């Protein structure tokens, strides 16, 4: 087996977040990466012409462990902090909360009269857990639900709101007790920005425009006064606006051309009405994008990006959404617990397909938007398994194992490597649904293994990508071969260097030896997450079965030495 993947990632640095100034030209670097051979996955070695600053070279040489590691499984990794890339936008660590199962009701909203400790109806335990992972933005109210949602049902006095149905997700009653004000209150409590998906499928431009006026108008319009009557005189801020959801499927089964016409109308008329938020704090608009890599999806991206290239003053978009779940076979989904190494290796191979999708759609975007003004927003991603036995299948309840922790790290690493184009992502979903951060059961809450990966990666939010190269080695199981190790590096705002390293191999540890050049590394410490089994989970009965534990590299002869445990995710900071 010998094959080559090419991965393109120009290192122009962009800012698309509203509080930051527009693109600055930082120069373009050539990139060579993702070279896979029969014995090695050589990852992410590139030359960069940016920022001639500090030079650090960390040579991390995997040492074969006596009696365990075979020759050819060692890792070599070098980091050059003078070779910086794009900013790893904190929005890459975004969340998604849909009115689906217990994603919002019970998971976030219990109501002010609940015995579960809450603040104005919002669970205190969930808020405190989410604050700790510094959630940058939350996408709401869907998902498929968004194209059925009529915002007026979700405002006004509690108890007087319309009770409607949720036909997408089990046909349950939607009480509308969690609406605009409750969502904004929740965001305020966790410190996140709003990413609101408007109803393009069954709504109208007028309905959506009025919702935005209701939320953002600062002047005393009738809608702004209604907002004040409902308890919030000050305008809300909507940082990100999703123009529909999966409009090629549950959002209306539109053709690319039909959607493109709709997108222009919604982009034109659905405004942020607050003049004070028009400049650097403007609302960024995200168009529906592809849901796969087949011709149907490349045609979709071509159509939207071509329209963008030809756009006039009257409309604009700032992002193109992409959805990609790791699922395998939709009709025979993998189980989220009770599996072994076969399913572990198969599923992780599937998740690495994200790289091809990003490359494919980025290449189309580059054609129409070489300056990378439009972000690729992967606003639904994660593992989608068979529903847990005994759960309502429409509620998409699954467990969250060590495999999911590794999967999350691999995807976050892919996003970081494409940070020049991928500037936002939203894992599906935040609470109780699919690959959740936290799961709740009445007054109980459990933090998942994916939660801990997000927590360990907090230092990468708004950090600067740093080039890293290494021989990953190969982990093989049956006919599956995967890179044994994956890693990214970044500098935070104080120029501290961070490494995130995943040892995919569930059987072999990796002995790392770091030889810093250009600096004197005094120490390296951080946390590692691993578990006895690939399907180890935290449960309500045993919530702390798997938690990160501290690790520290030893300094030997000026080198940093650290053993990475099998099937582990490790994040380290290097002290100089
Ligand atoms: O996340 C669950 C569903 O998956 C969303 O509602 C939809 O957008 C996607 O198909």
Image (tube, rainbow, N blue to C red):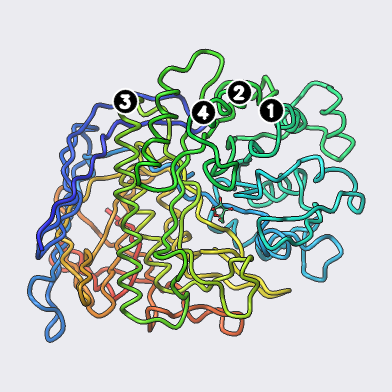
306 on left or right of 190: left
Mark 1 lies on a secondary structure that is: helix
Mark 2 vs 1, N-terminal side? 1
Mark 3 vs 4, N-terminal side? 4
Residue on which the image places disc 4: 260
Viewer-side residue, 42 vs 336: 336
Residue on which the image places disc 2: 265
Q: Nearer the viewer, mark 2 or mark 3?
A: 2
471 on left or right of 139: left
Mark 3 lies on a secondary structure that is: loop
Measured along the vertical axis of the image, is residue 418 above or below residue 431?
above
Whether residue 515 is visible, yes or no, is no
Residue on which the image places disc 3: 370
- The residues tagged by marks 2 and 3 sit, at their Cα atoms, a distance apart of 25 Å
In the rendered image, which quarter contains the N terminus?
Answer: bottom left
- The residues tagged by marks 2 and 1 sit, at their Cα atoms, a distance apart of 7 Å
Marks 2 and 1 close (CB-CB < 8 Å): yes
User: Which mark is drawn over residue 205?
Assistant: 1
Confirm or reject: label 1 Cβ below 8 Å from ligand 1. Answer: no
Mark 4 lies on a secondary structure that is: helix
How busy is the neighbourhood of tag 2: few (under 14 within 10 Å), some, or many (20 plus)?
A: some
Q: Nearer the viewer, mark 3 or mark 4?
A: 4
Mark 1 vs 3, N-terminal side? 1
- Residue 237 place in picture, x, y as percent: 67, 34
Confirm or reject: label 3 Cβ below 8 Å from ligand 1. Answer: no
């Amino acid at each position: 087996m010998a094959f080559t993947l090419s991965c393109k990632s120009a290192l122009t640095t962009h800012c698309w977040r509203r509080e930051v100034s527009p693109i600055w030209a930082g120069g373009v670097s050539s990139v060579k990466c993702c070279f896979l051979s029969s014995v090695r996955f050589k990852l992410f070695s590139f030359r960069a012409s940016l920022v001639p600053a500090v030079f650090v070279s960390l040579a991390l040489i995997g040492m074969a462990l006596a009696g365990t590691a075979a020759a050819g499984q060692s890792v070599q990794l070098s980091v050059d902090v003078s070779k910086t890339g794009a900013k790893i936008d904190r929005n890459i660590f975004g969340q998604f909360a849909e009115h689906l199962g217990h994603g919002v009701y019970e998971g976030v909203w219990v109501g002010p009269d609940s015995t579960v400790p809450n603040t104005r109806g919002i669970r205190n335990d969930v808020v405190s857990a989410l604050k700790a992972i510094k959630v940058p933005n939350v996408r709401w109210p869907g998902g498929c639900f968004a194209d059925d949602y009529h915002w007026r049902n979700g405002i006004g006095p509690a108890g007087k709101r319309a009770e409607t149905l949720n036909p997408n997700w089990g046909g349950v009653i939607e009480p509308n007790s969690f609406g605009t004000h409750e969502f904004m209150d929740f965001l305020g409590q966790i410190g996140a920005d709003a990413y609101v998906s408007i109803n393009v499928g069954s709504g109208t431009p007028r309905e959506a425009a009025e919702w935005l006026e209701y939320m953002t108008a600062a002047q005393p319009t009738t809608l702004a006064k209604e907002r004040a009557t409902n308890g919030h005189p000050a305008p809300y801020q909507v940082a990100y606006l999703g123009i529909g959801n999966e409009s090629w499927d549950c959002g209306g089964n539109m053709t690319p051309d039909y959607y493109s016409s709709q997108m222009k109308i919604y982009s034109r008329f659905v405004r942020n009405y607050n003049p004070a938020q028009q400049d650097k704090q403007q609302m960024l608009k995200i168009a529906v994008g592809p849901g796969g890599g087949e011709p149907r999806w490349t045609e979709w991206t071509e159509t939207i990006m071509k329209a963008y290239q030809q756009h006039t003053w009257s409309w604009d978009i700032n992002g193109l959404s992409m959805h990609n779940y790791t699922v395998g076979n939709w009709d025979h989904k993998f189980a989220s617990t009770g599996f072994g190494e076969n399913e572990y290796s198969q599923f992780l191979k599937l998740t690495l397909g994200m790289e091809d999708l990003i490359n494919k759609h980025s290449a189309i975007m580059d054609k129409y938007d070489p300056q990378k003004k439009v972000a690729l927003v992967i606003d639904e991603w994660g593992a989608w398994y068979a529903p847990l036995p005994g759960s309502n299948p429409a509620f998409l309840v699954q467990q969250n194992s060590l495999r999911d922790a590794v999967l999350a790290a691999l995807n976050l690493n892919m996003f970081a490597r494409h940070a020049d184009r991928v500037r936002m992502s939203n894992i599906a979903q935040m609470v109780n649904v699919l690959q959740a951060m936290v799961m709740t059961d009445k007054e109980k809450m459990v933090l998942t293994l994916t939660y801990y990966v997000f927590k360990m990666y907090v230092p990468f939010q708004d950090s600067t990508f740093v080039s890293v190269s290494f021989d990953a080695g190969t982990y093989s199981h049956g006919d599956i071969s995967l890179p044994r190790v994956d890693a990214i590096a970044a500098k935070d705002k104080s120029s501290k260097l961070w490494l995130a390293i995943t040892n995919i191999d569930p059987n072999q540890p990796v002995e790392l030896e770091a030889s810093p050049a250009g600096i004197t590394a005094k120490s390296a410490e951080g946390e590692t997450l691993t578990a006895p089994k690939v399907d180890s989970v935290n449960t309500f009965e045993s919530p702390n079965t798997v938690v990160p534990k501290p690790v520290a590299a030893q300094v030997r002869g000026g080198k940093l030495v650290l053993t990475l445990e099998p099937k582990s995710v490790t994040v380290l900071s290097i002290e100089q």
